[in-house]
Amino acid sequence: MTLILALESTCDETAAAVIDGELNVLSSVVATQEELHERFGGVVPEIASRAHIERILPVIDTALSDAGVTLEQLDAVAVANQPGLAGSLLVGLMAAKSLCLALDKPLIAIDHLQAHVYACRMAAGKDVFPCVGMIVSGGHSSLYHCHSPLEFETLGGTIDDAAGEAFDKVASMLGLGFPGGPALQRTAEQGDAKRFRLPRPLLADKDRLEFSFSGLKTAVRYELFGPANPVDSEQLDPQLIADMAASVQQAIIDCLIGKALLAMKRTNLTRLCVGGGVAANGPFRDQLEQATEQNAYELHLAPRSLCTDNAAMGAIAVERFNAGLFETLDLEISPGLRR
Ligand code: KG4
Ligand code: ZN
């Protein structure tokens, strides 16, 4: 049985997983850095890369021992080398290359965004391609025509902030901490989503498969604080915070679902696969399920445990292994979006 060690360090999660050739996840370890970035209200790249250096070896050791697998038993080492923060990507890549060099094992490259969609394939337990792939995370809000697990064609993306960034920044304005998405969702449960009429940028434009969330953030800011600077979330009434959280969450969800349905219509595909941290959002999941059901589309949502960054979705490396797609030790990082 093929055994692959997959590494993930594209942003602020240091992760390793051992996967077999049948896509069984034998172990999956994720070391988060939330506590390091919390006081800055966002991921600080320099802090992230230093923390990866400290964590990567213990995380690999734990993944191997949890799986009961030794380094020698591995058939390949896979690593997400794109896209992401340059310093963070480098730590994972250097660890993977070092293991391959020392153990004389093949190296496999993982595209982090393809891996997010592949989380849906893993959960489905069957082929889900071709499909529309949607990735909604802290760094990305993208739509793809996924011809196969490894062949993605860009349909659209965000022209400014990512959906997760909008959750995080509004949560920070509301004094809800970091990462903001889960906190904002919890707060929104007590709120009235109809209290504030917020913009749904680009939603009405049926010619554009694009998102824009920066105006939404500004609208929230003016609604709450007017021209005041700096903003002070401690002055805000708890009910107002909850109502704003619910209103913003709904505005983001409306934009995401609207464009996902537009992508389905444009491509004439019937399967939609959705991954990334924001796909863990409860109301988003519920409303997307309803919307796709009404249109008779087949929806594959990544399970919550595979939505936020992890190395188990690095199981996509099995596809590359089976296709004989290996890299030399000259492999480089590719921080930006190529497509
Ligand atoms: O996929 P991910 O772990 O990292 C990136 O590749 O960016 O996504 C992290 C993002 C953060 O912005 C976080 O606030 C958001 O996903 N997120 C959520 C929820 N859980 C995580 N956003 C909304 N609701 C949630 N329940
Ligand atoms: Zn991600």
Image (tube, rainbow, N blue to C red):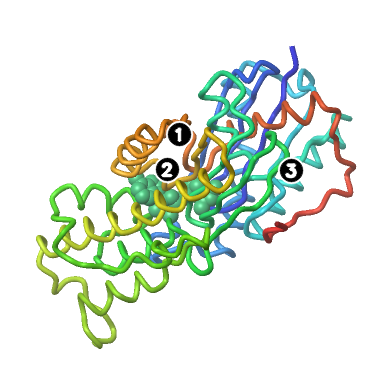
The spot of residue 171 in percent (x, y) is 30, 62
Observer able to see residue 191: yes
Name the one closer to the observer, 65 or 281.
Answer: 281
Q: Nearer the viewer, mark 3 or mark 2?
A: 2
Seen as rendered, the residue at the extreme top is 1
Q: Quadrant of the C terminus?
A: bottom right
CB contact under 8 Å: marks 3 and 2: no
Q: Earlier in the sequence, mark 1 or mark 2?
A: 2
Whether residue 85 sits left or right of residue 201 in the image: it is: right
Q: Earlier in the sequence, mark 3 or mark 1?
A: 3
130 over 191 or under it: above or below: above
Whether residue 12 sits left or right of residue 109 in the image: it is: left
Q: Earlier in the sequence, mark 3 or mark 2?
A: 3
Exactly how many numbered labels are in the figure? 3
- Mark 3: which amino acid? Ala
CB contact under 8 Å: marks 1 and 2: yes
Dot 2 beta carbon under 8 Å from ligand 1: no
Helix or strand or loop: what does disc 2 sit on? Answer: helix
Helix or strand or loop: what does disc 3 sit on? Answer: helix
- Mark 1: which amino acid? Leu
Q: For the residue carrying disc 2, how many other residues have a C-alpha within 10 Å: few (<14), some (14-19), or many (20+)? A: many
- Mark 2: which amino acid? Ala
Name the one closer to the observer, 244 or 25.
Answer: 244
The spot of residue 82 in percent (x, y) is 69, 51
CB contact under 8 Å: marks 3 and 1: no
Q: Quadrant of residue 109?
A: top right
The spot of residue 40 in percent (x, y) is 41, 67
Q: Which residue is mark 1?
A: 301
Q: Which residue is mark 3?
A: 95
Residue at x-position 25% and y-position 65%? 175
Q: For the residue carrying disc 1, how many other residues have a C-alpha within 10 Å: few (<14), some (14-19), or many (20+)? A: many
